[in-house]
Amino acid sequence: MSAGRFLLSCWVALAGLSVGTVWLGSWLGQGAPRGLTLLILLLAVAKAWLIADGFMELRHGPRLWRWLLLGWPLALALTRQFHVGLGRLRGLDAQCGAVAAATAGR
């Protein structure tokens, strides 16, 4: 595959992933399922992979640079998902405490 055709296919895939991210993000305000944020973050990691390996051509470069540039978005996505999970746990604790306080007063 020629370099121009490869870059065009990377661009089309990147545009498709971006449209998919926006489309999934429009569901967030409509009571989306819990795994939707994880799916959006995975799409963002896929876009970072396309940019690093496709446009920046790090698939032919040093492994350290490649893994650093691919590891950073993955670390951010995992950290974000961890914080979302903690926020949900704290919210559940607050709801359980409110229910316990309301039923104790009866």
Image (spheres, rainbow, N blue to C red):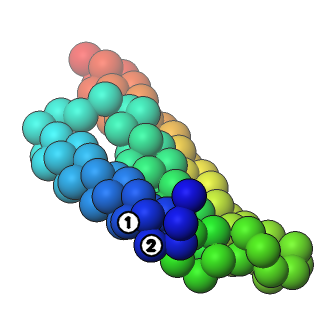
Q: Which mark is residue 4?
A: 2
Residue 55 rendering spot, x and y as whole percentages: 52, 77
| Among the 4 quarters of the image, the one containing residue 19 | bottom left
Q: Is mark 2 on a helix, strand or loop?
A: helix
Q: Do the residues labelled 2 and 1 touch (CB within 8 Å)?
A: yes
Q: Pinpoint residue 38: horizontal percent, then vertical percent.
A: 47, 44
| Quadrant of the frame with the C terminus | top left
Residue 49 placement (x, y as % from top left): 58, 63
Foreground pick, 42 / 51: 51
Nearest the eye: 73 or 16: 16
Residue 86 percent coordinates (x, y): 55, 49
Q: Secondary structure beneath disc 1? A: helix
- Residue 70 in the figure: left or right of residue 100: right
Check disc 1 and report the residue beneath it. 8
Q: Residues within 10 Å of mark 1 (few under 14, many from 20)?
A: some
Image-based side of 18 in relation to 42, left or right: left
Q: In which quarter of the image is the N terminus?
A: bottom right
Decide which of 41, 53 is in the foreground and name it. 53
Residue lying at the far front in this picture: please name it. Answer: 2
**Tag 2: Cα neighbours inside 10 Å, few (<14), some, or many (≥20)?**
few
Residue at 38% x, 33% y is: 34
Residue 16 appears in view: yes
**Horizontal arrangement in the rendering, residue 104 relative to residue 62 (left or right):** left
In this rendering, is residue 10 above or below 24? below
Please state which amino acid type lies under the numbered disc 1: Leu
Give the Cα separation between the discs numbered 2 and 1: 6 Å
